[in-house]
């Protein structure tokens, strides 16, 4: 019997408020469980926000900023920061068969990011006993964080990779609860020429290859926001090539 090729739908959502993105993920998890959508990767940015995983300790927010909201959510992991210049990816995937392995899923997310960074000329690696991605040079710093949720074997939440954010926002927290953790970015590692839009496409391609999808299928944001709002009310926009980095 000929094997059916799996395709990955990819939607670029632009800048989306964190709570609004969470509502979208919740709706899409239900849609994926119902078979209304296939496996889908959301790519976006958030305005400044600190998020705490479901069991995270608030002591890791060491210098709160009054202008930055703090949101506790149902993902794993400790505290992290999201903001402009950081690419966030939320995979809405139905894990089946041997893919129903949380550790295997986390390692695949790391592998996809490492492959994407390699295409930008940046050496990166995972670290034993930790989740996320670090640059591979002698000055070790974390470039990407992971915090996932899984509901009835459909994934949500996901990963955040620093393309060109203001890294000073990480100074207010202990990133991922790792004392002494320094954060870095693609721009700091010598590639300020890579835009968020460019890296979003690279990551989508590497994600597709790592998770063994046949191809990437671009998806209009409006088709997904329709699960939350009437299409004309969504008001979202795609990641722009001419965003000031």
Image (spheres, rainbow, N blue to C red):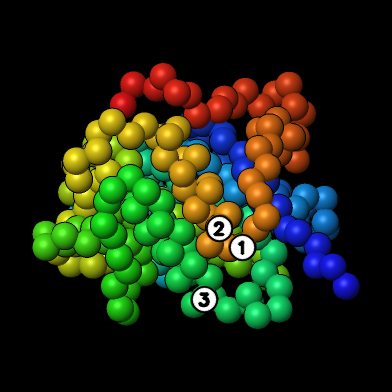
Which residue is drawn at the image coordinates 36% and 69% (left, top)? 131
Rendered image quadrant of residue 84? top left
Residue furthest front in the image: 2
Query: Is 112 on the left-hand or right-hand side of 132?
Result: right
Q: Work out whether residue 221 or residue 168 is closer to the camera in this orientation and state it.
A: 221
Q: Quadrant of the N terminus?
A: bottom right
Q: Which numbered disc, 3 or 1, marks the residue that appears first in the sequence? A: 3
Q: Which residue is mark 3?
A: 104
Q: Work out whether residue 75 or residue 128 is closer to the camera in this orientation and state it.
A: 128
Instruction: Identify the mark at residue 136; answer none if there is no mark.
Output: none
Q: Are marks 3 and 1 in contact (CB under 8 Å)?
A: no
User: How crowded is the residue under tag 2: few (<14 C-alpha within 10 Å), some, or many (20+)?
Assistant: some
Q: Does 209 appear above or below 86?
A: below
| C-alpha gap between disc 2 and disc 1 | 5 Å
| C-alpha gap between disc 3 and disc 1 | 14 Å
Q: Position of residue 130 (x, y in %)?
A: 32, 73
Count numbered badges in the picture: 3
User: How crowded is the residue under tag 3: few (<14 C-alpha within 10 Å), some, or many (20+)?
Assistant: few
Which residue is drawn at the image coordinates 62% and 23% (left, top)? 235
Q: Which numbered disc, 3 or 2, marks the residue that appears first in the sequence? A: 3
Q: Work out whether residue 72 or residue 116 is closer to the camera in this orientation and state it.
A: 116
Secondary structure found at label 3: helix
Instruction: Identify the mark at residue 212; answer none if there is no mark.
Output: 1
Q: Which residue is mark 2?
A: 209
Q: Does 37 appear above or below 138?
A: above
Q: Position of residue 103 (x, y in %)?
A: 49, 77
User: How crowded is the residue under tag 1: few (<14 C-alpha within 10 Å), some, or many (20+)?
Assistant: few
| C-alpha gap between disc 3 and disc 2 | 15 Å
Query: Is 48 on the left-hand or right-hand side of 8?
Result: left
Secondary structure found at label 1: loop
Q: Position of residue 220 (x, y in %)?
A: 68, 32
């Amino acid at each position: 019997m000929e094997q059916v090729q799996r395709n990955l739908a990819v939607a670029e959502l632009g800048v989306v408020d964190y709570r609004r993105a969470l509502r979208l993920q919740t709706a899409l998890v239900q849609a994926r469980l119902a078979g209304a959508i296939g496996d889908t990767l959301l790519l976006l940015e958030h305005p400044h926000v600190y998020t705490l995983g479901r069991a995270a300790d608030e002591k890791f927010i060491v210098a709160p900023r009054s202008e930055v909201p703090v949101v506790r959510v149902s993902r794993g992991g400790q505290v992290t920061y999201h903001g402009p210049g950081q690419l966030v990816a939320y995979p809405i995937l139905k894990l089946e068969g041997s893919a129903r392995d949380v550790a295997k899923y986390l390692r695949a997310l790391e592998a996809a990011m490492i492959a994407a960074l390699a295409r930008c000329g940046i050496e990166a690696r995972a670290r034993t006993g930790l989740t996320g991605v670090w640059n591979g040079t002698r000055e070790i710093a974390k470039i990407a964080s992971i915090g996932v949720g899984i509901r009835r074997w459909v994934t949500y939440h996901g990963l955040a990779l620093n393309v060109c954010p203001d890294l000073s926002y990480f100074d207010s927290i202990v990133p991922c609860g790792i004392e002494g953790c320094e954060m870095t970015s693609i721009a700091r590692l010598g590639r300020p020429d890579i835009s968020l839009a460019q890296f979003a496409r690279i990551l989508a391609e590497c994600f597709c290859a790592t998770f063994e999808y046949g191809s990437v299928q671009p998806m209009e944001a409006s088709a997904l926001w329709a699960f939350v709002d009437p299409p004309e009310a969504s008001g979202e926009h795609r990641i722009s090539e001419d965003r000031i980095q």
